[in-house]
Image (cartoon, rainbow, N blue to C red):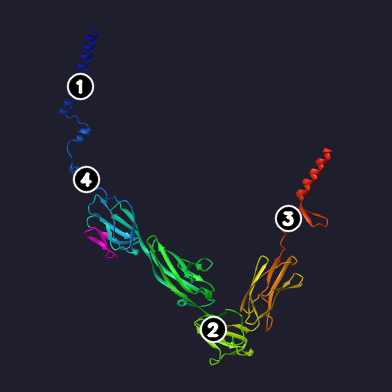
Amino acid sequence: MELRRIALLLAFFVVAVCSQCSDAHTMRKRGAEDGDYDENLMGDEGPTDDEAQNDDRGDEKETPPETIITQPTSYNVTVGRTVRLECKVSPNNRPVIQWSKDGQPLFMGQARFPMAQLEMPERLNVSIATNDLLIVDVRPADSGKYKCTVIQAQQTSIEHVIAVQEAPRIIRYTVSDNGVVMEGSELVLRCDVAGSPAPTIIWSRDNGAGNVRLTEADAIFTLNTATIKNVRREKAGKYYCFVFNALGSTQSEHNVKVLHKPHVQVHKTVVNSALEVEAILQCVAHAEPAPRITWYKDGSMIDPFSPYVVSTDGPHSNLTVTPHQDSDFGTFTCVATNSHGKHNRSIELVQRPVVEGVELEGNKLSWRVHSHQPLRKVELQLRDTEAVVTTLNVPLPEDTNKHEIEFIYALENVTPGKYEVVVKAENSKEWSRESEPVIVDYEAMPMPIQTASVYHGNSHSIRPASSVILSSAFMYLLVRMF
């Protein structure tokens, strides 16, 4: 029963609603027939001419602005390669575009119909189909920023960056005064290089023993130069400019001469000889340019036709002397001369002994004596801090006729202290000059430690102390027992 009641109520509600809808529809229809219009319905009556024209324009679709869908890109390109810079436009309705490099225009117009093509090398070309910029045979000057711009009411653009990579190369390597400089002047090395990334420069010199890199102690370095102040003769040689980057390396060299006056060196300052004994005196003269070498005896130039023999090979010169009389001994001088000056060193040719090479090791002294005459005496002279001199005679070897004798002498029985020691030798002609002094800080050698001993009367017998101790202990026990 309850369900029937609900169903009847729903039926009455539906009939009532439908009746109201039908009345409203009848009233709107009647009003229309009677000419009762509202403003909105009048608008539907029909468009005027202007409205019709507006409707026609409204039906046309507006063209959307073109945009660049390519992303900005950085390119690392090796010299000689080809690179394409993309400028993809959407929608692609053959827009007017402009390519520029570092703010300078290269191209403007449609790809098929360029309006401006300014300062664009033949190696650069704009693709008809894609608007891309193509660069062939890339060169270092092609590095830079390239911008593609779409010319329209709302301009849009994209910028690419090209970094051209190039293996290092040396454009020019120069040295001040073409590598010939005067000693004491300034030497400037300059190495102009190219490459990308920018090359690093290393400077070095071949010193005869190998290629040694220059340091801050040798020169002042700037971007591409090395400056050596107050250049010395020892700095002559080959100087290298070595450059490198990530793509490779190369180097160039330049020979440097340092002009200077001669510098003479001698092998020995004193040479011992004897009558009818040949002696060779040696000297070496370093100079730039090469010097002329002459020999003098006691201040007078030696005549080429004299009995002396001069032999010169480059910087080396030897004088051979065979004394026939005492006057043939004396002072011989090697003189070297060039356009920048002269220098000399002297050598004494003597009959007296010559002491050389005095060395000290611990309390032992060693030296050499040169003498073509038999030795008579060799002695040491010790001078203490109060200038008191102690003379020690050194035993002579059995064979004193040798021309060179080695000596080794150990200092013993000398008061401990500091001494200046020189060596002298005498032969059948005269005494030698004193040797170069050496400083000796003498300490007496300690005596070896021995086991304690006990001395018994005049018997001179020695028994170990341990036996005495045992005997004493034994006697003590006997006394206790009794």
**Magenta residues (range):** 108-127
When the figure is inspected, residue 88 is found, relative to residue 169, above or below; the finding is: above
Amino acid found under the numbered disc labelled 1: Cys
The residue labelled by disc 3 is 450
| Residue 23 appears left or right of 67 | left
Question: Distance of mark 3 from mark 2, alpha carbons?
Answer: 62 Å
The circle on residue 318 is 2
Q: Of the residues tagged 3 and 1, which is closer to the observer?
A: 3
Q: Secondary structure at mark 3?
A: loop
The residue labelled by disc 1 is 21
Q: Secondary structure at mark 2?
A: strand
Amino acid found under the numbered disc labelled 3: Gln
Quick one: quadrant of the N terminus?
top left
| Residue 407 appears left or right of 92 | right
Question: Distance of mark 4 from mark 1, alpha carbons?
Answer: 43 Å
Which residue occupies the foreground of this view, 127 or 19? 127
| Residue 133 appears left or right of 401 | left
Which residue occupies the foreground of this view, 274 or 196? 274
The residue sitting at the top extreme is 1
Q: Residue at x 81, y 43 (%)?
A: 475
Of mark 4 and mark 1, the one earlier in the sequence is 1
Of mark 3 and mark 1, the one earlier in the sequence is 1
When the figure is inspected, residue 88 is found, relative to residue 323, above or below; the finding is: above
Q: Secondary structure at mark 4?
A: loop
Disc 2 crowd rating (10 Å Cα; few below 14, some 14-19, many 20+) is some
Question: Distance of mark 2 from mark 4, alpha carbons?
Answer: 109 Å
